[in-house]
Amino acid sequence: LPVYRGDMVNGREAICGHRQYDAQRLVRGYSAARDIMQHLGWKASASQEQLSGSPAWTSHEMLVLDYELPQLRQDEQGRVFLGSTHWPWIGERTRQLTGAHVTLLSEVLNPVACKVGPDITRDQLLSLCERLDSKREPGRLTLIARMGAQKVADRLPPLVEAVRQAGHKIIWLSDPMHGITIVAPCGNKTRMVQAITEEITAFKHAVISAGGVAAGLHLETTPDDVSECASDAAGLHQVASRYKSLCDPRLNPWQAITAVMAWKNQPTSTLASF
């Protein structure tokens, strides 16, 4: 049975016919994204002067290349940009230096981002930065650390220092969720809020101590009152009670506020600037 890869690719039901890849899902996904972009104030034919106010920008993982490649466009100067989102990013599993995802990201005009995990080496990271930010443009590249609290404290500072010394004027974000996923007693994936706040604290200290720019958080959240992440040890036994995610566990609103407050309560970097 093919793996469920998201509603834009195939169906979630564990039935062979539903799990077959369906290109019409990409078309429906594009239509939904277009409607949302227009709702946010981005009109396809509007000039900069015609845009209503300052529309919210968008960002998503550049994962499904069959969706992304048809949305490459050229600006007035002939430069290629990705029209599916303002700020595309790639994950830890698709950051291979010679892979299709890194190649595409390296060729577009958009600001770009890449997740880095605890196993990346200094040389691998520098090669990745060279590929994605060869001109060393401020604001071009963002790196998103997803390592877990202890590994962030140990492994991130030398990476931040190496990138800074190589002349890449990047910003760092913390993804405090993907490096700490565990399995609850019910068998569902979950995340402990305490582990999330610990990683946020460790991340900010690690980046600042190495002279980098700690710029924000990358969180998976929902406005719904779900129980997918556990607020404490007792909550591990309640994870299944309101579990709605088809993929990874998300923070509910109160848990998201806890994570943001953990960031707010830590000092902001003043040691490095562009």
Image (cartoon, rainbow, N blue to C red):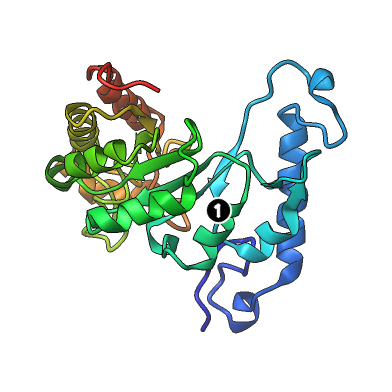
Residue closest to the eye, 167 or 230: 167
Q: Is residue 221 left or right of residue 108?
A: left
Please, what is the three-letter code of the amino acid marked with disc 1? Leu
**Where in the figure is residue 208, as x and y percent of width and height?**
22, 26
Q: Is residue 183 visible?
A: no
Note whether 106 is above or below 213 in the view shown.
below
Q: Position of residue 176 (x, y in %)?
A: 29, 41
Viewer-nearest residue: 14 or 34: 34
Q: Residue at x 28, y 63 (%)?
A: 187
Where does residue 101 sit, x and y in percent of width and height? 53, 61
Judging by the rendered image, the residue that carries numbered circle 1 is 105
> In which image quadrant can residue 272 be found?
top left
Q: Along the horizontal axis of the image, is 77 left or right of 242?
A: right
Along the horizontal axis of the image, is 99 left or right of 188?
right
Disc 1 on helix, strand or loop?
Answer: helix
Locate the C terminus and report the quarter of the image it occupies: top left
